[in-house]
Image: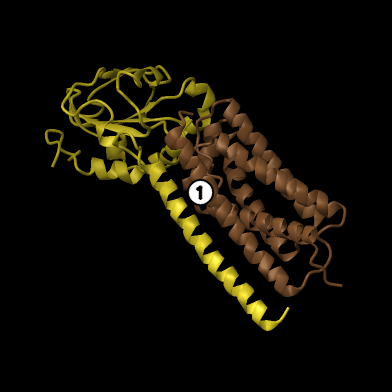
């Protein structure tokens, strides 16, 4: 029985949104691997060899999780893993801000610039979305089958959502740089 | 859902996808440019003026070995590269430095703006042991360092011949290539 219930569609859309986000994030980190490695080393909280390994593993995990979420959407385990990863990133960004580590994020490649409150807000929004979708999935929302055309449309709008989200973040970050002293 | 509705939905998806992609690319390019170009001051305007004397020509290596004096090798041109382990852009450059030809590295003083580098960055320092490495935290102000990595090219008396913001090791090679290092009497070509 196919269903187009709004909450069902919303959970699937969030799933695809996060999936594309991880794919983009992982790909851009792999593309700027040297810079991402440098950023991890500059935090100076782990051994350089471990930083090197982490810098390679993090984008690989993001990429694999993103692809898995596209192939098998709205599964609790994947949404939970996404929430955990985003939670770790958010805590890390909060720690870097608290320690006043004036360093680049490279979360989405070179254009990301320095870690700031905007970065923290961005991750908090993503964390809220993933937690909401994860909770929904836990109680069965998002598991009802949808038509294949609807799935394709949701997949496409998930990608559009990511592009708009990143463009919006970039705009907010530019505004911060131009008009805010911090 | 009839065929026409379906086609309209996919056309709308394609159009909004294209617009979103264009917006994303535009914002991303603006972000990259904003990241690369400091808005308030050009890199060429930063630092001490060309033609002036360095505030210091004698440097103590981080391991308290023998003091080094300008010129660092022979009696010719020396390069002072201000960088830091705690800056991610510099990290990429610092990883590339061991690949520099010996003729350049003999004359390159690596002025690191971090503190306690021998304790905090022991592993990374091992890869840079062929350079003169100075813990230069206190030198940032007298040398007017506002951007890292930043390089001064100085003559044998410590006069600044050139200064430049550095992004990759290729930038260093490009600058050093302008100086005939094998013949110390000649500087800029």
Give the vertical position of B189 relative to B63 (above or below).
below
What residue would you read off at disc 1?
A109
Give left or right: position of B93 versus A3.
left
Residue drawn at point x = 55 percent, y = 50 percent: A166
Give left or right: position of B104 versus A106.
left
Nearer to the camera, A48 or B162:
B162
Classify the position of the C terminus of chain B by image quarter.
top left
Residue drawn at point x = 49 percent, y = 33 percent: B124
Residue drawn at point x = 61 percent, y = 35 percent: A93
Give the vertical position of B78 relative to A16 (above or below).
above
Give the vertical position of B126 relative to A69 (above or below).
above
* Chain letter tied to yellow: B
Colour used to depict chain A in the structure image: brown
Classify the position of the N terminus of chain B by image quarter.
bottom right
Residue A135 percent across, percent down from the top left: 82, 49
Q: Chain of mark 1?
A: A
**Label 1 Cα neighbours within 10 Å, binned few <14 / some 14-19 / many ≥20:** many
């Amino acid at each position: 029985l196919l269903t187009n219930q709004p909450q069902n569609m919303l959970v699937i859309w969030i799933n695809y949104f996060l999936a594309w986000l991880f794919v983009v994030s992982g790909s851009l980190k792999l593309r700027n691997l040297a810079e991402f490695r440098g950023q991890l080393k500059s935090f100076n909280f782990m051994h350089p060899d471990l930083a090197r390994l982490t810098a390679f593993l993090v984008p690989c995990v993001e990429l694999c999780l993103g692809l898995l979420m596209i192939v098998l959407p709205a599964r609790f385990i994947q949404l939970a893993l996404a929430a955990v990863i985003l939670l770790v990133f958010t805590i890390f960004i909060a720690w870097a801000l608290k320690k006043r580590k004036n360093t680049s994020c490279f979360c989405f490649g070179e254009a990301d610039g320095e870690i700031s409150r905007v970065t923290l807000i961005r991750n908090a929004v993503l964390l809220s979305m993933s937690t909401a979708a994860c909770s929904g999935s836990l109680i069965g929302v998002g598991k009802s089958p949808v038509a294949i055309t609807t799935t394709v449309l949701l997949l496409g709008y998930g990608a559009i959502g990511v592009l708009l989200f990143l463009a919006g973040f970039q705009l907010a970050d530019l505004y911060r740089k131009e008009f805010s002293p911090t | 859902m009839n065929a026409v509705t379906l086609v309209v939905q996919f056309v709308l998806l394609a159009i909004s996808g294209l617009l979103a992609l264009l917006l994303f690319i535009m914002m991303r390019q603006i972000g990259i440019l904003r990241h690369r170009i400091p808005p308030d001051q050009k890199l060429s305007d930063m630092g001490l003026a060309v033609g002036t004397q360095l505030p210091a020509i004698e440097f103590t290596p981080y391991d308290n070995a023998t003091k080094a004096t300008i010129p660092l090798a022979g009696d010719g041109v020396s390069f002072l590269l201000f960088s830091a382990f705690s800056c991610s852009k510099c990290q990429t450059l610092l990883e590339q430095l061991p690949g520099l030809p010996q003729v350049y590295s003999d004359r390159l003083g690596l002025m690191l703006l971090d503190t306690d580098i021998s304790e905090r960055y022991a592993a990374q320092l091992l890869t840079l042991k062929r350079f003169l490495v100075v813990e230069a935290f206190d030198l940032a102000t007298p040398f007017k360092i506002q951007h890292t990595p930043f390089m001064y090219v100085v003559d044998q008396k410590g006069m600044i011949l050139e200064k430049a913001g550095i992004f990759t090791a290729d930038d260093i090679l490009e600058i050093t290539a302008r100086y005939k290092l094998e013949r110390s009497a000649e500087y800029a070509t």
